[in-house]
């Protein structure tokens, strides 16, 4: 397996200082992003400040091992078994940050943490509270509620093939690794999700008290004398999340040669989806059904954000204040309403849709694209999204016959991967 050369580490924005995520009492916890000039290529180190490179420095490193180099800047020399991605031939391996190589031990620790309510200050919520395996790790709600009762203004995202995402969350250009992303639900306070910063001592006391964790942390970070730290928690969760790979839907089986895996209607739907008439594939194309994808062999990482015409409040070119997309990070009016095109894998399981959960069904999604956007006719956000100045030229609208609609839906449903939502390796280990 080839290892992609990592580009040098430069953060997108110097403004992205996340020292507030550090836990002074428990060491490390650095954001992992060095600040630097913007616009340069960005690397994906997780939580350390080493720059990328090919060299493997740990005594046990094996440059031929799959899943990335065996060295680790935080625990060089650890003896962890090489990681094997078990992927079909047509699916590339994910890119793994050099400072957080995969290991079965870290994945197992991360899985326990992902499902553990003790990670929230008031012990009421875990990652899984908003990311439910049966729903492809979405939650079925328009907007979720955090551990202290605050409403989160964004729809909980499905966690499907997140190892391949070029950026994380609906519209941030700043979250480039899963371990950095994990800091948001843990420590974010606008709104509070897990609220870990509200009582870090209690959280660490709970973890240190549990013999299950004593051994899980020791196995995952064998070279460290004091492995229970935020950075190690975030890296382990990231390692678990990287294993959440869905590539065995009926549509996948069809593309791998099983002609009978999907219906004739779904086959026609696929043809529509990938056609210039309907344009979907421009933004939701590729093996992961999103053009915002990186993998082991990606030469140049692009991080696109698109406006698909959902809002245009009072014709001002603005999206509602809680969800202005990329604009929130760049303050450039040309970025208003721009979001990352999400993967459409398992999409039939993850309603309601869009960044604010404002679209209830796939039928409605098709109506919106057919109309070339959404005309919001009443309420505080009334305005015609179809005429949004930032709307992509790929969202121009089209005629949709009833047969086309049925075919589209059959195709989108053929992206549901039953194996993914029932895989015991992704389930709650505490049950
Ligand atoms: C209260 C509900 C809630 C909890 C708890 C929660 N999340 Fe999320 N998650 C969300 C929402 C909402 C988003 C979208 C956030 C945004 O775009 O601003 C999200 C986005 C994500 C993403 C980005 C996915 C992508 O495709 O870009 C990842 C990864 C993720 N969450 C992992 C986690 C992990 C790990 C935890 C636990 C440490 C966690 N979440 C806890 C609601 C939650
Ligand atoms: C110009 C790029 C673009 C094109 C073309 C496009 N989409 Fe999208 N799609 C997006 C973006 C961006 C979002 C998220 C928007 C938001 O949340 O505000 C999205 C969201 C979706 C969602 C909801 C995803 C979720 O997890 O909530 C579905 C379903 C979808 N698109 C299907 C389609 C179909 C079907 C087509 C073709 C008819 C299509 N898209 C064409 C960019 C595009």
Image (tube, rainbow, N blue to C red):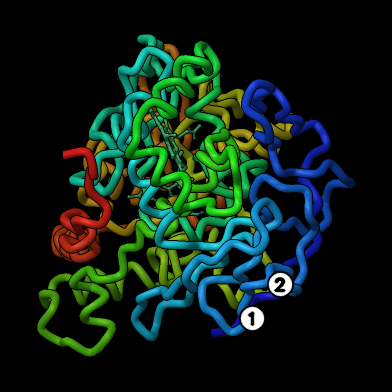
Return the x and y of residue 417 as percentages of the image width and height. Answer: 21, 62
Q: Assign a secondary structure to mark 1.
A: loop
Residue underneath mark 2: 56
Q: Are marks 1 and 2 in contact (CB under 8 Å)?
A: yes
Q: Assign a secondary structure to mark 2.
A: loop
Question: Quick check: can you spot residue 248?
Answer: yes
Return the x and y of residue 166 as percentages of the image width and height. Answer: 58, 56
* Of residues 88 and 401, the one drawn nearer to the viewer in this rendering: 88
Q: Residue at x 22, y 38 (%)?
A: 430
Q: Mark 1 vs ligand 1: CB under 8 Å?
A: no
Q: Residue at x 50, y 62 (%)?
A: 102
Q: Quadrant of residue 256?
A: bottom left
Whole-number angstrom distance, CA of label 1 to CA of label 2? 7 Å
Return the x and y of residue 373 as percentages of the image width and height. Answer: 42, 42
Q: Residue at x 57, y 29 (%)?
A: 324
In the displayed structure, does residue 244 sit left or right of residue 80?
A: left
Locate the N terminus and report the quarter of the image it occupies: bottom right
First in residue order: circle 1 vs circle 2? 2
Quadrant holding ligand 1? top left
- The 10 Å Cα crowd at callout 2, few under 14, some 14 to 19, many 20 or more, is some
Q: Residue at x 68, y 35 (%)?
A: 28
* Of residues 363 and 70, the one drawn nearer to the viewer in this rendering: 70
Q: Quadrant of residue 364?
A: top left
Return the x and y of residue 293 as percentages of the image width and height. Answer: 53, 63
150 vs 415: above or below: above
Residue underneath mark 1: 63
- The 10 Å Cα crowd at callout 1, few under 14, some 14 to 19, many 20 or more, is some
Q: Mark 2 vs ligand 1: CB under 8 Å?
A: no
């Amino acid at each position: 397996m080839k290892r992609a050369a990592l580009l040098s580490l430069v953060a997108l924005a110097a403004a992205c200082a996340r020292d507030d995520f550090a836990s002074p009492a428990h060491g490390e916890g650095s954001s992992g992003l060095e600040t630097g000039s913007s616009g340069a290529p960005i690397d994906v180190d997780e939580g350390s400040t080493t720059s990328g490179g090919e060299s493997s420095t740990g005594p046990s490193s094996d440059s031929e091992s799959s899943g990335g180099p065996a060295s680790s800047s935080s625990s060089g020399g650890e003896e962890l078994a090489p990681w094997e991605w078990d992927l079909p031939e047509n699916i590339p391996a994910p890119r793994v940050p050099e400072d957080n190589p995969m290991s079965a031990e870290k994945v197992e620790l991360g899985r326990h943490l992902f499902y553990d309510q003790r990670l929230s200050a008031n012990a009421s919520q875990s990652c899984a509270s908003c990311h439910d395996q049966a729903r492809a790790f979405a939650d079925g709600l328009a907007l979720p509620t955090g551990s202290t009762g605050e409403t989160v203004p964004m729809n909980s995202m499905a966690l499907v093939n997140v190892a391949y995402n070029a950026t994380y969350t609906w519209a941030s250009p700043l979250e480039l690794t899963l371990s950095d992303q994990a800091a948001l639900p843990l420590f974010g306070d606008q709104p509070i999700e897990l609220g870990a910063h509200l009582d870090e001592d209690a959280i660490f006391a709970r973890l240190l008290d549990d013999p299950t964790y004593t051994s899980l942390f020791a196995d995952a970070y064998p070279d460290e004398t004091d492995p229970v730290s935020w950075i190690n928690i975030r890296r382990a969760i990231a390692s678990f999340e990287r294993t959440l790979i869905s590539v065995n839907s009926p549509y996948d089986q069809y593309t791998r040669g099983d002609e009978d895996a999907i219906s004739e209607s779904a086959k026609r739907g696929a043809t529509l989806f990938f056609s210039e008439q309907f344009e979907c594939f421009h933004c939701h194309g590729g093996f992961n059904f999103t053009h915002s994808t990186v993998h082991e062999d990606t030469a140049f990482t692009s991080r696109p954000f698109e406006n698909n015409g959902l809002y245009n409040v009072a014709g001002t070119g603005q999206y509602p204040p809680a969800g202005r997309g990329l604009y929130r990070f760049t303050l450039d009016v040309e970025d208003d309403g721009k979001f990352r095109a999400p993967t459409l894998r398992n999409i039939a399981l993850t309603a309601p849709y869009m960044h604010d959960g404002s679209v209830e069904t796939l039928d409605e999604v098709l109506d919106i694209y057919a109309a070339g956007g959404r005309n919001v006719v009443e309420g505080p956000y009334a305005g015609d999204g179809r005429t949004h100045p930032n709307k992509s030229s790929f969202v121009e609208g089209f005629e949709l016959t009833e047969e086309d609609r049925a075919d589209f839906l059959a195709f989108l449903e053929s992206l549901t991967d039953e194996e993914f939502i029932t895989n015991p390796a992704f389930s709650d280990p505490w049950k």
